[in-house]
Image: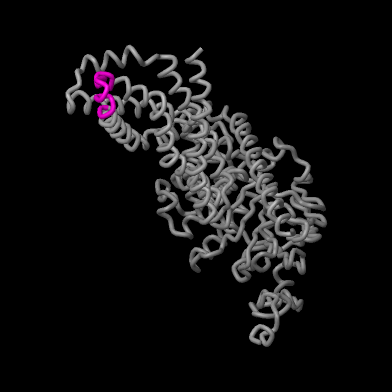
Amino acid sequence: MPDTIIAMSLVAEFPPSALSPNACENLVELKDVSFGYTRARKILSGVTLAVPKGKLVAVMGGSGCGKTTILRLLCGQHRASSGEVLVGGQSVATMDREQMFAHRRKLGMLFQFGALFTDLSVFDNVAFPMREHTQLPQDIIHDLVLMKLNAVGLRGAARLKPSELSGGMARRVALARTIALDPQLALYDEPFAGLDPISLSVVGQLIRKLNDALNMTSILVTHDVVESMKIVDYIYFISEGRVVAHGDVPSIKASTDPFVRQFVDGQSDGPVRFHYPAKTLAEDFA
Amino acid sequence: MIAVFDAIGRVGSAVIAGVSRIGYATRFLFAILRHSGPSFMRPRLVIREVYQAGVLSLIIVCMSGLFVGMVLALQGYETLSRYGASESMGVLVAMALVRELGPVVAGLLFASRAGSAMTAEIGLMKTTEQLAAMEVMAVDPIARVVAPRFWGGVISLPLLAVLFSTLGVFGGFLVAVKLIGVDSGAFWSQMQASVDWRYGVMNGVIKSVVFGIAVSLIAVFEGYDADPTAEGVSAATTRTVVTSALAILALDFVLTVFMFRGEIN
C-alpha cells in the first residue's frame, strides 16, 4: 500500500509552514501573464507569481478579478495571450495534446460547485480517475476509494448519489476525487463558497492536512479571508487582473496597504469601489 | 439606403454564422468518429446509451406505431373499397409504413424523446462543469460522453423504426382483418407479394440509419455547444427537436428521390 495513502488516512496534524515563495524550488510560475477572452477586455494583465513545491498558496480577490482564470491557465483550459505559465518548469502554452493530458494527470482540481458526475455514485465518482488512468484491479480500486473517502469522513456515504448529499458533503467528495491519483499539484476553486461554518472549517483543515500528508503543492482561489489565513502559507491579492499585494500570513495581517486592509477588514468602499461606474445620482434622477 | 445596407449586412452575417455552424458540426462529427475507438473498447458505455435512447423510447414508439397502423387501415379502407380493392389493404399499410412512415415518424419521435434528453443531459453536464472536470482529469469528454451517446442513438433508431413498422402492420391487421373483415390470407399474401425486400424493407432501414446519424449528431452537438446557462440548455433542447425534425423531412425527400429512381431503373 502506498505510503501516501497511509499518511493521508492517518491525517496527521501538520503545522502550516510559512516560507516565502522564493525560499525553495517553485512548482508553478506565472511570468508577466496576460489573458483576455477578447482583445478589448483583459482579464489578467501582467500577472507574475510563484508557488514553491509543497506549499499551500492562496489567490484572493473580489468576484470577477481573474482568480479562476489563473487556475484555468494552469490546467490548460485557456492559453495565455502573452507571458509564460510554467508548471514543473514546462510551459503549459506550448504543450501538445499528449503532453497536455500527461500534465493534467499530475494535477487535481476542485471545482467551485464540485462538478461531481450526477449519474455516478459517490464511490464511482472517486473511482473515475483511477478507472480511466490506471489498470488497477477492481478490488484494489475499491480499497483505495474507501481510503480516500475515509480521509474526508465520507466512507459511509460511498453508495449515495450526488443528489443525496449536502453542499458540504459534495465538496468533500469532490475533494476526495481531486486527490484520487495523489496529484503533484492541487487547484481549489472557491472551496469555501456556500458552506456552513462547520463544513467550512472541516474542508479548510482537510485541504491543509492533505497538502502536507500527500506532499502536494496547492493553490487555493478564494475570497474567504478568515478561513484561508488559518491554513495557507502565502497569499497573493489580485485586483482588476493584476497582483496588487502578496506576502505570508503575518505580513498580510500587519499590512497597511489600502487594498489589503479593505479586503482583510471587509470594508465596503476603498480601492475596490462598491458602486459600478455610473453617472452621479443627481444626473440619474434629473 | 443605409437601412438596405444594414439589412443586407444582417442577412450576410446570418449566412456566415449558419455556414460556420455547419462547418463546426462537421468537424465535431469527425472528432466523434476519431474518438469512437474507446467507446467500442468499453461496450458498456454504448450499451448504457442504447438503453437510455432506445429501450426507454420503446413505449412511445410501439404505441405510436400501433395507432398509426390502425389509422392507416381505416383511412385506406375508405379509399380502396371505392375501387373494390380492399383486399390490398395489407399492401397499403406495409408499403406506407416500411418505406416512409416507419423511419420518418420513428425518427421524429426519437428526436423528441431521446434527442432532447441527450442535449439536455450534455448541456447540463457542461453547465455544472462536469465536462470541464473530465477535461482537467485528462479524460476527453468527446470520447467518454459524446461518442457513446452518438453511437447509442445511431444503433437505436433503426431498431425502433423496425419495431414501429412491425407494430404498425399489426395494428393495420387488427383493423383490416379483425374489425372490418378483410380476408386474412389476402391481407398477408398480397403484402408478401408486393413488398420488395430491397426496395421496400432495406430502403426503409437505410433511411432510419441516416436519420439516426443526423438526429444523434444534432442532439450531441447542440448539447456540447449549448450556452452553459439554464436558458442556453433550454434553447439548445428546442433547437435539437426543431432541427432534427427539419433534417429528417429534408433527408427523407432526398433519399426518396434516389431510391425512387433506383426502383424505376
- Quarter location, residue A100: top right
- Quarter location, residue A228: bottom right
Q: Where is residue B10 drawn, in percent x and y?
A: 68, 52
Residue at horizontal 65%, vertical 48%?
Answer: B14
- Quarter of the image where the N terminus of chain A is located: top right
Depth check, front residue: B7 or A10? B7
Q: Where is residue A132 drawn, in percent x and y?
A: 56, 36
Main SS of the magenta part reads: helix
* Observer able to see residue B160: no
A49 displayed left or right of B66: right
Depth check, front residue: A226 or B108? B108
Q: What's the coloring here?
A: one colour
Q: Where is residue A91 drawn, in percent x and y?
A: 78, 45
The stretch drawn in magenta includes residue A272: no
Relative height, residue B89 to residue B72 (above, below): above
Which range is magenta?
Answer: B77-89
Residue at horizontal 75%, vertical 76%?
Answer: A255
Depth check, front residue: B185 or A47? B185
